[in-house]
Amino acid sequence: METIASKTAFLKYDYIKKLMDLDAHTVAAWGKMNVQQMIEHMSDYVRIASGKTVYALHTAEDRLPKMQGFLMSDKPFQENTPNPLMPDVPPMVRHVKKEDAIAELEQELNYFFEVFNAHPNAKHMNPFFGELDYPMQIQLLHKHAMHHLRQFGVV
């Protein structure tokens, strides 16, 4: 089982490189997003983790223990996991090039780490998993990143 420290290291040092090495024209094994839409989607969710973007809780309070139990497990997200915050048709890309989308994601990850470095006890609302502290945010970002890397055959 990987530790929070190893997952943090992956997000800080390895994740961006894997995305840079991913061909922009790779077809997803499932889902509707292309490579760049996935990268921009990840930026959106890092902004939620850092508290920059705030959503109300979409999960019933009595389901949060089960959701957080799954979050902290080694179980991966299933293929085609529904996301009620996403439209049926993925949004148009915000950036001209994949590299620009990656630069945005890297900036958002850096901001995320700065926020928790300055406020190590902070908790931010995730619309599906509730209030999450730093280890839980790392767990979720890593699980989410691995889900999309599998989607495009990277891991």
Image: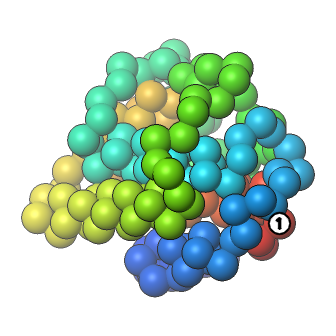
Residue 19, quarter of picture: bottom right
Please give left or right for residue 76 compared with residue 92 in the image. Answer: right
As drawn, the residue found furthest toward the front would be 96
Residue 91, quarter of picture: top right
Residue 109, quarter of picture: bottom left
Q: Position of residue 104 (x, y in %)?
A: 38, 58
Circle 1 residues within 10 Å: few <14, some 14–19, many ≥20: few
Residue occupying image coordinates x 66% and y 78%: 21
As drawn, the residue found furthest toward the left would be 118
Pointer 1 residue: 153
On the question of residue 155 being in view, the answer is yes
Label 1 sits on a secondary structure element that is loop
Q: Amino acid at mark 1?
A: Gly
Between residue 57 and residue 21, name the one nearer to us.
21
Q: Position of residue 43 (x, y in %)?
A: 44, 50
Residue occupying image coordinates x 78% and y 72%: 155
Please count the marks in the image. Answer: 1
Residue occupying image coordinates x 51% and y 74%: 16
Q: Position of residue 98 (x, y in %)?
A: 56, 60
In the image, is residue 138 above or below residue 14? Answer: above
In the image, is residue 63 above or below residue 12? Answer: above
Between residue 99 and residue 45, name the one nearer to us.
99
In the image, is residue 152 above or below residue 132? Answer: below
As drawn, the residue found furthest toward the right would be 29
Q: Quadrant of the N terminus?
A: bottom right
